[in-house]
Image: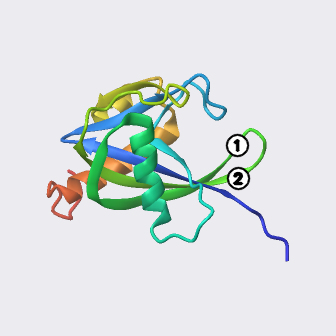
Amino acid sequence: MNYKLYVVNVEAAIYKEDKWLIIKRSEKEEHGPGLMSLVGGKVETDVVQDGILEVTLRREIREEVGIEVSDSIHYLESKTFPLADGQLVVDIVFVCKYKSGEARVVDSNEVGEIYWMTCEELLQDERALSWLKESLKKAEDLRLRLEGGDNGEGKG
């Protein structure tokens, strides 16, 4: 059999009230330098581990922006994209509620700037690419359901 190997990446759509934590990737980053993005990173382990996606997500959040998120994280979506070298990435996005800490640039090799933005602000921001806008629209819909702002009948 011919198997393709994938890099596994996790991302966190983190909300605090009605604002979302968005980063500008460092200009030093190999993939997507200077782009607006969610916090996240690659799954890296050499041991068998339960909850590896969640463990990786929490580690990346601490390492990149220095905050903690609530215990409950929610699956949002998955997708694939290629790296510059052609390696395919499986990207899994989760929605997380901010818990504690002050968001700051912890690793300037990975994060250039931090923004707290409403969904509407991000959708209007010309620096944000379409894939980020689509993910954040989905995250906002889930946040509203989680926070009790949607009765199941949709917006309208």
10 Å crowding of disc 2: few (<14), some (14-19), many (20+) = some
Between 133 and 17, the one lying in front of the other is: 17
Q: Where is residue 88 in the image (x, y as percent from the top left)?
A: 70, 52
Residue 122 position (above or below residue 2): above
Residue at image point 37% right, 51% down:
138
Point out the tag, 2 or 1, that comes first from the N-terminus: 1
Q: In this view, does 90 lie to the left or right of 118?
A: right
Kind of residue at disc 2: Leu
**Secondary structure beneath disc 1?**
loop
Q: In this view, does 16 lie to the left or right of 32?
A: left
Q: Position of residue 100 (x, y in %)?
A: 22, 42
| Rendered image quadrant of residue 147 | bottom left
Q: What residue is disc 2 on?
A: 88
Circle 2 sits in a helix, a strand or a loop, which is it? Answer: strand
Image disc number at residue 42: none
User: Residue 52, relative to residue 21: is it above or below?
Assistant: below
Relative placement, left or right, of 2 versus 143 is: right
Q: Is residue 38 visible?
A: no
Which residue was labeled with disc 1? 83
Measured Cα–Cα span from mark 2 to mark 1? 6 Å
Quarter assignment of residue 104: top left
Position of the N terminus by quadrant: bottom right
Outermost bottom residue: 1
Q: How crowded is mark 1: few (under 14 residues within 10 Å), some or many (20 or more)?
A: few
Q: Residue furthest right?
A: 1
Q: Which amino acid does label 1 sit on?
A: Leu
Residue at 38% x, 35% y is 65
The picture places residue 59, in percent across and down from the top left corner, at: 44, 49
Residue ID at (15%, 62%)? 151
Q: Nearer the viewer, residue 126 or 111?
A: 111
Question: Image height check: is 8 above or below 111?
Answer: below
Q: Nearer the viewer, residue 152 or 81?
A: 81
